[in-house]
Image: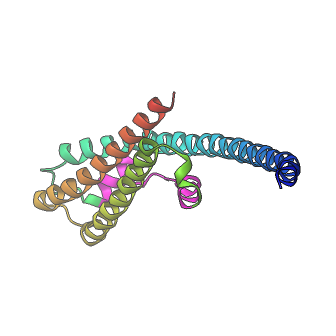
Amino acid sequence: MLKYLKHVLKEMVPVILGILIALFISNWKENRTNEQYVTKALATIETEVKENLSSVSEILPRHYALLEQLVAELENDTLTIAEIITDAGGVQLPTIRSASWKFFLSSKTELIDYPIISALIEMDESKRVMDIKFEQFLTYAYQYMAASSQKDKEMFIAYFSNLVDSEETLKALCEVYLSDEE
């Protein structure tokens, strides 16, 4: 019986070692593949955040100029809101992309650290709030484009300032994300 047990052990040890080595190699390959995936995904996300930052940074000065012009023309009852907007170059919502990190978060969330996930979710929430504020702004703006009274301009400034505040928040979130990534 002891001889049989020794024989079985001699046969099993190489098989068990082979299985363990195969599992180790498989895990190592999977970890390496995941690391490469995360590296590529984070690089793509960083590019997207840089583009978003660029878009917001490009639009904010125009929006500041429009706010200044609205305040300057607040008491001028001869100029309509539409004329002031036209003179200032119009209103535009920044193009904000989030497709790459939404895809990444939906597939392999467990591979990245919580602070990164949190920052991306915060940016997305900020974009969502900005979109809502833009819709509210447009609803008001379309109704009062021909208005020229101080009261209507003050309301327009309030809605528009609210939108600009969201743009500033999104810009700050993008800057923080990019500075944390460096």
Figure label count: 0
Residue 8 shown in magenta? no
Which image quarter: residue 72? top left
* x and y percentages locating residue 129 in the rendered image: 32, 59
Query: How has the structure been colored for display?
Result: rainbow
Work out whether residue 108 or residue 2 is closer to the camera in this orientation and state it: 2
Work out whether residue 13 or residue 86 is closer to the camera in this orientation and state it: 13
Which image quarter: residue 127? bottom left
Work out whether residue 144 or residue 49 is closer to the camera in this orientation and state it: 49
As drawn, which residue projects farthest toward the top?
182
Residue sitting at x 46%, y 43%: 116
Residue sitting at x 15%, y 62%: 152
Name the quarter where the N terminus is drawn: bottom right
Residue sitting at x 73%, y 42%: 28
Q: Tell me: 88 left or right of 9.
A: left
* x and y percentages locating residue 143 in the rendered image: 26, 72
As drawn, which residue projects farthest toward the front?
1
Q: Tell me: 78 left or right of 181.
A: left
Q: Tell me: 94 left or right of 18.
A: left
* x and y percentages locating residue 141 in the rendered image: 28, 65
Residue 88 shown in magenta? yes
* x and y percentages locating residue 118 in the rendered image: 40, 48
Taken as a whole, is the magenta stretch helix, strand or loop? Answer: helix
**Residue range highlighted in magenta:** 82-106
Work out whether residue 43 or residue 133 is closer to the camera in this orientation and state it: 43
Which image quarter: residue 128? bottom left
